[in-house]
Amino acid sequence: MKHTADICDMNEQLVASGKLKILPPIFKSYAKKKFISGEILTVKAIEDNSLVRSTLELPGNKRILIIDGAGSYRCALLGGALAKLAEKNKWEGVIVFGCVRDSFEVKECDVGVWALATHPKRSKKAGAGIIGEAIEIHGTQIKSGEFCIADMDGILVSAEEL
């Protein structure tokens, strides 16, 4: 297992060329698992976690769900029940460009969870969003099928498994 700092050190040319992307250091780890790696599936879900739930109900096959919540601080897109669902269905982890809640439950789940912050309010449930489309987080484009490695030092995205 290679951690993000080591991967960056060994792949300085990929970082410089933009082929190895580093998400900005705005995410905090909330769950038990502090190192995750796997193939990415994206969901765009702004203040509505209906598609997050339906996606996490599927077999995860050790993938990482990256949720583009537009960086909203107005509600949570993932809570204890969905973190437990991710663990049950063998998702490697969930990265939320937005908020989580039930942090006391999330921290007990054996799955990786990174998010911007916590928020006590739940999201809408109107079925809005898009699964599998390219998303953008602070200028970094992320596509389903790319690979992610996340640990306590940062979050990396690459077109190829490293």
Image: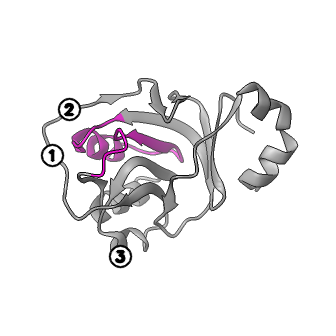
**Is 91 left or right of 55, judged from the image as shown?**
right
Q: Amino acid at mark 2?
A: Ala
The residue where tag 3 is placed is 104
Percent position of residue 119, x then y? 28, 62
Q: Quadrant of the C terminus?
A: top right
Name which of mark 2 and mark 3 comes first in the sequence: 3
Identify the magenta region.
44-73
Q: How many marks?
A: 3
Instruction: Identify the residue at image location x=21%, y=42%.
Output: 48
The Cα atoms of the two marked residues, 2 and 1, are separated by: 9 Å
The residue where tag 1 is placed is 124
| Secondary element at image label 2 | loop
Percent position of residue 62, x then y? 54, 48
Q: Amino acid at mark 1?
A: Lys
Name which of mark 1 and mark 3 comes first in the sequence: 3
For mark 1, does the 10 Å Cα neighbourhood hold few (<14), some (14 to 19), or many (20 or more) residues?
Answer: some
On the image, which quarter does residue 159 sit in?
A: top right
Q: Are marks 2 and 1 in contact (CB under 8 Å)?
A: yes
The residue where tag 2 is placed is 128
